[in-house]
Image: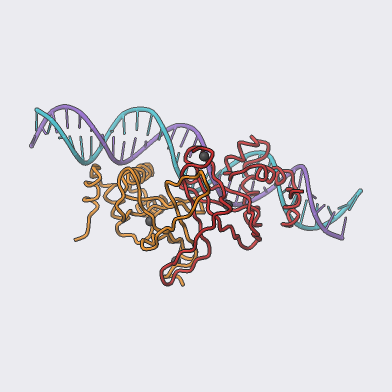
Chain colours: A red, B orange, C purple, D cyan
Amino acid sequence: MNITADDILKQSHLSITSSRIKILNLFLETKGALAHGDIEKKFGGKFDRVTIYRTLQTFLDKGIIHSIPTADNSVQYALCKDDCTAGHHHDQHVHFICNQCGNTVCLDDVHVPTVKLPIGFTSTQVHMIVSGICKDCK
Amino acid sequence: MNITADDILKQSHLSITSSRIKILNLFLETKGALAHGDIEKKFGGKFDRVTIYRTLQTFLDKGIIHSIPTADNSVQYALCKDDCTAGHHHDQHVHFICNQCGNTVCLDDVHVPTVKLPIGFTSTQVHMIVSGICKDCK
DNA sequence: AAATTTTATGCAACATAGTTGCGTTTTTCT
DNA sequence: AGAAAAACGCAACTATGTTGCATAAAATTT
Ligand SMILES: [Mn+2]
Ligand SMILES: [Mn+2]
Ligand SMILES: [Zn+2]
Ligand SMILES: [Zn+2]
């Protein structure tokens, strides 16, 4: 028995609304990551753009999704599979962006290696974004 | 004797224009990375926004600057110190974003480690962005 | 050094992306 | 079911980025 959108919202103490259910279901059904624009296209005016922005922000805050910075200035979002909480994210996996199909995927099994920073620098978060050709496009 | 903006433009076979000189000098004078907005603020209407966009794109193409994706959807740019050419960039160093002062810096001495990707994935570029507290803010 | 060609810039107009306030609707709590 | 709290939709606005084209500046040729 898989976890449902409903469960996730309850766990995060969020009101169950139809926008949240639908957006969360889209994440659950999608392999890769989603940008704000993807969600907007998918639901084509079914709900307001602003609702999507606020929903994504809420999900980020609650540790339901994490954001992935990309070089082309379009932030992608993906479900957190690790045990992220409202306070902090622990998604320490590598992200892969395919230059062919454009998909962004979480490489859940590829852990971000630690690097030795110069004296005086303290790290709280590390992003590793690899781009190239994915297994479906090779 | 340090390299001048003029030299860099000549090396890249670019016309020497006052906008390019000024923007390039700003990069040469600045320790950290610059976002489009930073440059716009700095020169406050001295030249057109469009010129800044096009100049940054030209510098990127010619391998004079490289771009650094950030989580807050604002791409940063920094001078290439490695031997980047018009075709390809080889800036394989880690980038650090300070949550305190907001500065983004190239950690030129910290090399991006290689990771083993799953079967079928091929990598052409790797970004590693570490955020935390920089040495000036600790 | 002047004329010509090439390239870059500024401007306008547009497109896309993201934010904020507020009245209305929906959800939750009692 | 009714009251309180939270989320939504709409409008208006700001910010960010793109494109075409006339003008200006730089490089090249004569
Ligand atoms: Mn991920
Ligand atoms: Mn760098
Ligand atoms: Zn692909
Ligand atoms: Zn700092």
Observer-nearest of A137 and A70: A137
Which quadrant does ligand 2 occupy? Answer: bottom left
Observer-nearest of A8 and D4: A8
* x then y, percent, for residue A23: 67, 44
- D5 horizontally vs B74: left or right: right
Question: Where, quadrant-wise, is the N terminus of chain B in this rendering?
Answer: bottom left
Q: Residue at x 30, y 59 (%)?
A: B29
* x then y, percent, for residue A20: 70, 46
Image mark count: 0
* x then y, percent, for residue A47: 67, 39
Which residue appears farthest toward the front when viewing the image?
B119
- B106 horizontally vs A24: left or right: left
| Vertical position of residue A62 compared to residue C2: above or below | below
Observer-nearest of C3 and B110: B110
- A13 horizontally vs A112: left or right: right
Q: Residue at x 53, y 62 (%)?
A: A125
Q: Residue at x 67, y 45 (%)?
A: A28
- A28 horizontally vs C9: left or right: right
* x then y, percent, for residue B16: 23, 45
